[in-house]
Image (spheres, helix red, strand yellow):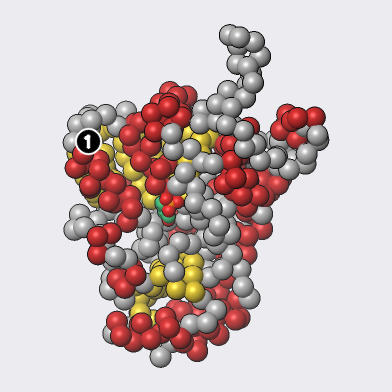
């Protein structure tokens, strides 16, 4: 599968990711001819004159290391503008705050990251008096039925965390357009390598860069990319002036470094995930495997059309008791039990055992089966991964 052959950039994805398309501006900044954009820690920049700032003034508002990363991420998403935030949640909350007015209306998929659910139910609805409707977004008709002329924002996550459900970005973008609503897509699970929501009609795309973009489990961050100039102005104001929740120069450096190997890593994540998904599907103590690359995934066809690969995230339903499931997790040696995903190391998480009660999902969103196991398939040897599961499963 080759995506980005018709990419609007002159260069294709892997070339852009490595950075060969970067303008000389960043490579030669400071006259030292760095091949790697340096980490600019300065909080403040000398003014050109008493009344005229240079390109950068104060690092909350703009910083050269951050500007280089934001430009790089925008190019990778095929978008005009990029902004990077202190976390994926900062990117999400800033987007909602900037694009939805108090007392406004959000229609959200009912299959979303637990933090986003809490943001919508506790903060948006609880503090900002925003009406939030959750719907099963696998069927765009459900979105269409919930949207009205007062809707400010439609929000989806595809593939979703942790149920690996998809929604049809193009179909939902048509609904958003017809109602003059903004349409946001959390594309964290796919990464920009396997999915291009802006090309399919989304208005804003968000990523937790903590996951695949950084890819090495050593930086918390988030990004928003948009083609909409007005939305960008609102988002940039919120990020730089009102909230000040931008990504630090050191984290920008880490994410920029991770981004260079995104294509190579994603290809490998996908290959390993397919091997693990097929192994799990054949195991008698596994009830159901949720991986869009499997023909058994109810939305396999949509995945094949909308994504250029199936990524490295899957979940499965263990056939047994919670006690047996806990024993299985403890037996694993290559997989590490832990939160987060998208790094080079394989991780497993059992939401019913590992997510504290205060973050567990409310009734408005899709139910997570008690024995669901979320797997972030890393870059280890696929045979070792399958062997580890085979040995640990009862
Ligand atoms: C992790 C995650 C987030 C939140 O990102 P943080 O960097 O942890 O704040 C949002 N959406 C999805 C799909 C995620 O997996």
Q: Is residue 172 visible?
A: no
Q: Picture coordinates of residue 27 (x, y %)?
A: 75, 35
Q: Is mark 1 within 8 Å of ligand 1?
A: no
Residue 389 to residue 228: above or below: below
Mark 1: few/some/many CA within 10 Å (<14, 14-19, 20+): some
Residue in the image at 49% along x and 67% along y: 376
Quadrant of the rendering where the C terminus is positioned: bottom left
Question: Residue 390, image x and y in percent?
Answer: 50, 87
Whether residue 236 is visible: yes
**Image position of 133 (left or right of 82):** left
Count how many numbered circles sit on residues in the image.
1
The residue depicted at 29 percent of the width and 51 percent of the height is 117
| For residue 28, above or below residue 133 | above
Q: Locate residue 266 relative to residue 241 in the image: left or right.
A: right
Task: Give how far across and how far down residue 347 sits, in percent.
Answer: 49, 70
Near-viewer residue (6 or 280): 280
User: Residue tagged by mark 1?
Assistant: 128
Which one is in front, 297 or 284?
Answer: 284
Q: Residue at x 34, y 70 (%)?
A: 354
Q: Position of residue 234 (x, y in %)?
A: 40, 26
**Residue 272's image quarter?**
bottom right
Q: Secondary structure at mark 1?
A: helix
Q: Which quadrant holds the N terminus?
A: bottom right
Query: Foreground: 159 or 349?
Result: 349
Q: Residue visible at 61% across and 68% down? A: 379
């Amino acid at each position: 599968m080759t995506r980005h052959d018709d990419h609007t950039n002159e260069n294709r994805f892997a070339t852009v990711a490595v950075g060969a398309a970067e303008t000389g501006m960043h490579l030669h900044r400071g006259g030292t001819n760095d091949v790697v954009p340096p980490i600019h820690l300065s909080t403040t920049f000398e003014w050109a004159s008493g009344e005229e700032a240079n390109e950068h003034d104060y690092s909350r508002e703009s910083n050269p290391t951050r500007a280089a990363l934001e430009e790089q991420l925008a190019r990778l998403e095929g978008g005009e503008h990029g902004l990077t935030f202190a976390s994926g949640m900062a990117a999400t909350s800033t987007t909602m705050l900037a694009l939805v007015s108090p007392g406004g209306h959000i229609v959200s998929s009912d299959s979303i990251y637990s933090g986003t659910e809490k943001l919508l139910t506790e903060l948006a609805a609880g503090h900002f008096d925003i009406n939030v409707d959750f719907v099963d977004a696998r069927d765009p008709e459900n979105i269409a039925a919930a949207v009205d002329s007062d809707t400010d924002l439609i929000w989806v996550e595809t593939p979703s965390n942790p149920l690996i459900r998809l929604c049809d970005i193009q179909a939902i973008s048509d609904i958003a357009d017809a109602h003059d609503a903004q349409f946001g897509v959390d594309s964290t699970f796919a990464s920009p390598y396997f999915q291009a929501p802006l090309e399919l009609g989304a208005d804003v795309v968000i990523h937790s860069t903590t996951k695949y973009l950084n890819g090495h489990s050593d930086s918390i961050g988030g990004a928003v990319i948009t083609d909409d100039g007005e939305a960008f102005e609102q988002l940039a104001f919120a990020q730089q002036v009102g909230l000040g929740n931008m990504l630090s120069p050191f984290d920008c450096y880490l994410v920029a470094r991770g981004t260079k190997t995104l294509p190579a890593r994603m290809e490998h994540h996908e290959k390993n995930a397919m091997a693990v998904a097929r192994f799990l599907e054949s195991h008698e103590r596994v009830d159901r495997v949720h991986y869009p690359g499997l023909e058994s995934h109810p939305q396999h066809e949509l995945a094949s059309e909308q994504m250029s690969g199936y990524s490295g995230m899957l979940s499965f339903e263990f056939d047994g008791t919670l006690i047996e499931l806990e024993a299985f997790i403890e037996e694993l040696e290559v997989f590490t039990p832990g939160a987060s995903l998208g790094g080079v190391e394989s991780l497993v998480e059992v939401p019913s055992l590992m997510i504290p009660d205060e973050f567990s999902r409310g009734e408005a969103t899709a139910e997570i089966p008690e024995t669901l196991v979320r797997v972030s398939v890393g870059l280890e040897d696929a045979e070792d991964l399958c062997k580890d599961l085979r040995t640990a499963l009862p």
